[in-house]
Image (tube, grey):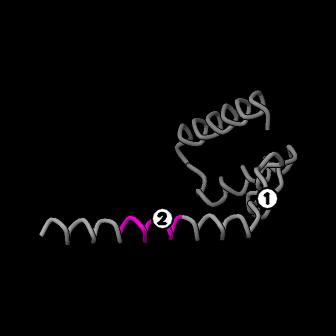
Amino acid sequence: MTDADTTAAIEALAYRIRERDADPERSDADVFALEFMTALRGRGWRPTAAKTEQPPLHAAPVPDRRSRDEELARVRAEMAARAEAAAREAEGAA
């Protein structure tokens, strides 16, 4: 729906609710809801199933698996070297 369509739908629903509330012999809420849904369908609204969100067309490509594995191996080796250096430094301080 466009903004104008949304505004028109809100105004129509508000009008119908005010008219219903002003009536001393209020109609059943289920009947009111059915009438409103029938009016929406008459204006072209159709229920649709929920869809999963698709990634945008401009999404970044998935990185190459080999480069990721190489980077992980590099980081792990760097962490191991730092841990070893810290252990040697702790031994020297003691």
In the rendering, at what x and y percent does residue 56 appear?
A: 78, 49
The local crowd at label 2, few if under 14, some if 14 to 19, many if 20 or more residues have their Cα within 10 Å, is few
Give the left or right position of residue 61, taking residue 90 as reference. right
Q: Amino acid at mark 2?
A: Glu
Q: Quadrant of the C terminus?
A: bottom left
Please determine whether, in this image, residue 21 is positioned above or below residue 74: above
Report which quarter residue 2 is drawn in: top right
In the rendering, at what x and y percent does residue 77 appear?
A: 50, 70
Compare residues 44 and 20 and report the one nearer the observer.
44
Name the mark on residue 47: 1
Compare residues 58 and 35 and report the one nearer the observer.
58
Give the left or right position of residue 31, taking residue 22 as reference. right
Q: Amino acid at mark 1?
A: Pro
Q: Are marks 1 and 2 in contact (CB under 8 Å)?
A: no
In the rendering, at what x and y percent does residue 68 appear?
A: 67, 65
* Residue range corresponding to the magenta coloring: 75-83
Residue 63 belongs to the span the image colors magenta: no
Q: Residue at x 79, y 55 (%)?
A: 61
* Residue where numbered disc 2 is placed: 78
